Amino acid sequence: MLYGGYDHTIDKKGRIAIPAKLRDEFGNSFMICRGIYGKNCICVYPTEQWDKLVEKIGNLPSAKSSVVKRYLYEGAFEVEFDSQGRILIPASLREFASLETEAHIIGVDTNLEIWNKELWQKENSEYTPESIAAIVNELDF
């Protein structure tokens, strides 16, 4: 399970270090793509989770599946860690997520999200303990 939030910088070459605690969930190579949940962030998927996502997308009606596949695959890249635990975020993805120098990495269970730090702060400020409690109450936990 991937969890936690971490502030990191992106170097001039577009590389960002992924915390060691999070790297353990990834193999030699994995997938990075545009976020598909209506947010301008980057998603990083271990291969196993990527394969599950691709399978679920394939189960959509063909017209919807085609649209999602075009969007997802056009901005998807296979990446690897370098010797210092960094990944290179392709320029098109950095532009999509407005990633320049400061980023926030979040573990969200099965994948990571990489956000522009300011956009993350704005996104996260919309939620309050009360609004989260209202959602959690739906769990009947």
Image: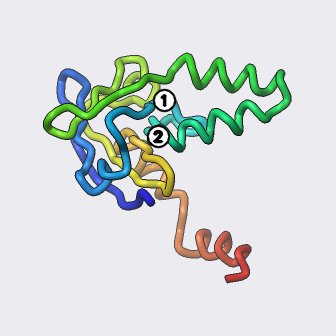
Which SS class for mark 2?
A: strand
**The residue positioned farthest toward the bottom in the image shown:** 141
Residue 59: which quarter of the image?
top right
Horizontally, is 62 left or right of 140 in the view?
A: right
Tell me the CA gap for discs 2 and 1.
8 Å
Q: Identity of the amino acid at label 2?
A: Tyr
* Color scheme of the displayed model: rainbow
Which quadrant would residue 93 be assigned to in this image?
A: top left
Considering the image in quadrants, where does the N terminus appear? bottom left
Picture disc at residue 50: none
> On screen, 102 above or below 12?
below
The front one of 27 and 111 is: 27
At x 50%, y 52%, the residue is: 110
Q: Which numbered disc, 2 or 1, marks the residue closer to the eye? A: 2
Q: Which residue is at a point 67% across and 69% down the rendered structure image? A: 135
- Image point (47%, 40%), residue name: 45
Would you name the residue on which mark 1 appears? Answer: 33
26 relative to 109 in the view: left or right:
left
Does the residue at mark 2 contact the one at mark 1 (Cβ under 8 Å)? yes
User: Mark 2 = which residue?
Assistant: 45
Q: Nearer the viewer, residue 5 or 18?
A: 18
* Mark 1 surroundings within 10 Å by alpha-carbon count, few (fewer than 14), some (14 through 19), many (20 or more): many
Compared to residue 7, the image places residue 17 above or below, namely above
* Left or right: 129 as drawn, with respect to 81: right
